[in-house]
Amino acid sequence: MADVKLNNGYAIALGNFDGLHIGHMAVLDKTLEQAKNGLKAAVMLFDEHSMKDITGEAPPKLITDSERAGIFEEKGLETFIVNFSQIKDFSPEEFFEKILTEKLNAKAVVCGFNYRFGKKAKGDAKLLEEMCIKNGVDCVIIDEVITDGLPVSSTAIRKAVECGDIGKANRMLGRKFGYCAEVINGDKRGRTWGFPTINQKLPDGLAVPQFGVYESIVTVDGKNYKGVTNIGLRPTVGTDCILSETHIISFEGDLYGRCVDVRLVKFMRQEKKFGSFDELIKQIKSDVCCVKGGV
């Protein structure tokens, strides 16, 4: 951030961007639009979620940090990381002056309608706009975005993910919820049943979907495959941690140790304990048939 004074200034997107949902993307797109006026486009993030200071813990993530960083880079946005512990006691005025103006050379800022800043989130979007007008900084506030008749928010998306309403979550995200994680060793039982699977642990801090079976899309070497993904504790077989276990339809190959991307498309059924492996195998065959047929 030492070079921020060596250009005409920045158009800066403000927010936690903890989900990069369609509301967040509207903020980013408007920031890029503002940057067409001779400014550079950037997004300002804290090194930890600002809600941690209020509630004591950060909310579950809807996107991993690495995936989010990739989207920022793809869109041509620089990223400024601010140490939250160093500024959490700043008043709204101090934050505006010391961080936005002095440190980041902001000439334009873009935020959502519910943006909060300053100690204990005392400042709001209206106050930010007033400060910008007073200091000659352009300010754009993005109105709430509505999907399925409801305001889009990270909170609403987390609830949808945790309830298994993955379709609703995906519509609010503007992409499919999922994860890219290393394939780890399992008990290899699936291959003896004719349904080999990849086992993955969910990334740390990621929102945990409702336990159950999902239709999924799995990407391997740039090619997309249909998949059947079970998330949970595999009650029939048993496991000591939450796992994602996916059968990749029409794929053959060894993926152990590789990071594989899995996206959830549709919730199919709840996880359950079967009376026998034969019952489980019968259900797996049914699940695979449903996904193959696009039911």
Image (tube, rainbow, N blue to C red):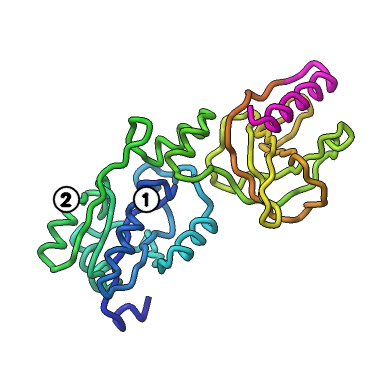
| Residue 103 can be seen in this image | no
Report how many numbered discs are placed on residues in the image: 2
Q: Nearer the viewer, residue 62 or 221?
A: 221
Please, which residue is most extreme toward the left here?
134
Amino acid identity at mark 2? Lys
Which residue is denoted by mark 1 in the rendering? 24
Q: Residue at x 35, y 47 (%)?
A: 23
Q: CA distance from mark 2 to mark 1?
A: 18 Å
Residue 85, position in %: x, y? 37, 59
Placement of 268 over or under 240, stated as above or below: above
Dot 1, how many residues are within 10 Å of its Cα: few (below 14), some (14-19), or many (20+)?
A: many
Amino acid identity at mark 1? His
Determine whether the residue tagged by mark 2 lies in a helix, strand or loop: helix
In the image: residue 213, left or right of residue 48: right
Q: Quadrant of the C terminus?
A: top right
Residue 133, position in %: x, y? 12, 62
